Amino acid sequence: MSANDLPVALRPGLLGRFAVNTLVGVSVLYALLPVLWLLLAATKDRDALFNSDVLSLTNFSFWQNLTEIFAEDNGLFGRWYLNSLLYAGIGAAISAMVSIACGYAFDKYVFRHKEKLFGLVLAAVMVPQTVLALPLYLMASATGLVNTFWAVFIPVLFNPFGVYLGRIFSQGYVPGEVLEAARIDGAGELTMFFRVALRMLGPGLVTVFLFQLTAIWNNFFLPMVMLSDQKLYPVSLGLYAWNSAATVSPEYYPLVIMGSLLAVLPLIVAFMLLQRFWRSGLTAGAVK
């Protein structure tokens, strides 16, 4: 239904439309201008950056910056990039599956202290991740996992907010009648989950995956606490180390900017490929 199909009393006025369009335009500019600056700055050499000559068409050094960033420190940035793909890609996939399975169990099964346990999950959602860094470090130290891949990978597999979303999606997407019909046909509980419920929970699985992918990819404090070996750094921590070094060695500035541009590409690609599942997941349960 368009605005012209609405009754006259419900049609937005000219001033209202102008205000809404202006607000939307300002919001879009606020979100896109930093990305545009980053894209332009990644094409400039160090002299252009220090001369604030980012908007000019001269000093084009995109390919030179791209070559240098993968050659610096014997290709260390490529190692950081691979680490982030492993931490975020595999971690988000496992975390999404665990979250959806736990949410499904909270929704469809009855067991002792179910709501109390779910209350603990909701309480865990409110705990900042920085508060957990020190206890996680002490646990990793006691088990000999500090400064290893697993010290960063294992904690990101568990996401209380994902469990909450998993229960919401299970309530909205998986009818109890379908599960009862599967039980009558002789399907076991695991078979029902993987062959029946999980297909219905596809939008929820993708939504939790995208949330967790973004959180793990941007994770900074936990790797900084856990890791001292630069070869295990994710991109976020590696670029921070280069940016700190740039105060002494200015040649790192173009590398940091180019690295920041490359760091946002996987998230953009993931959202573009999975956005239709994500949007359908966000509207789950909105309309009966």
Image: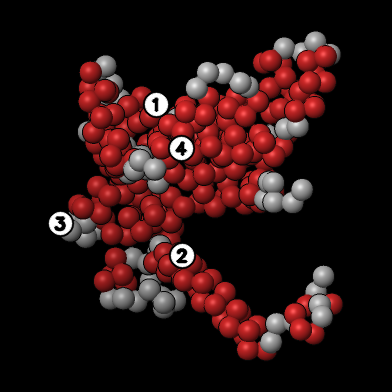
Residue 9 against residue 259 in the figure, above or below: below
Front-lying residue, 23 or 272: 23
Q: For the point 49% across and 39% down, which residue is it?
A: 161
Task: Tell me which corner region of the image, top left, top right, bottom left or bottom right, holds residue 216.
Answer: top left
Which of pointers 3 and 1 indicates the residue nearer the eye?
1
Q: Quadrant of the N terminus?
A: bottom right
Q: Amino acid at mark 3?
A: Val
Q: Could you tell me if the residues under marks 3 and 4 are in contact, i.e. CB atoms within 8 Å?
A: no
List the residue tagged with mark 4.
122
Q: Which mark is residue 46?
A: none
Q: CA distance from mark 2 to mark 1?
A: 32 Å
Residue 170 visible in the current orientation: yes
List the residue tagged with mark 2.
35
Q: Give the secondary structure at mark 1.
A: loop
Of the numbered discs 3 and 1, the one sitting upstream in the chain is 1
Residue 268 against residue 88 in the figure, above or below: below
Of the numbered discs 4 and 2, the one sitting upstream in the chain is 2
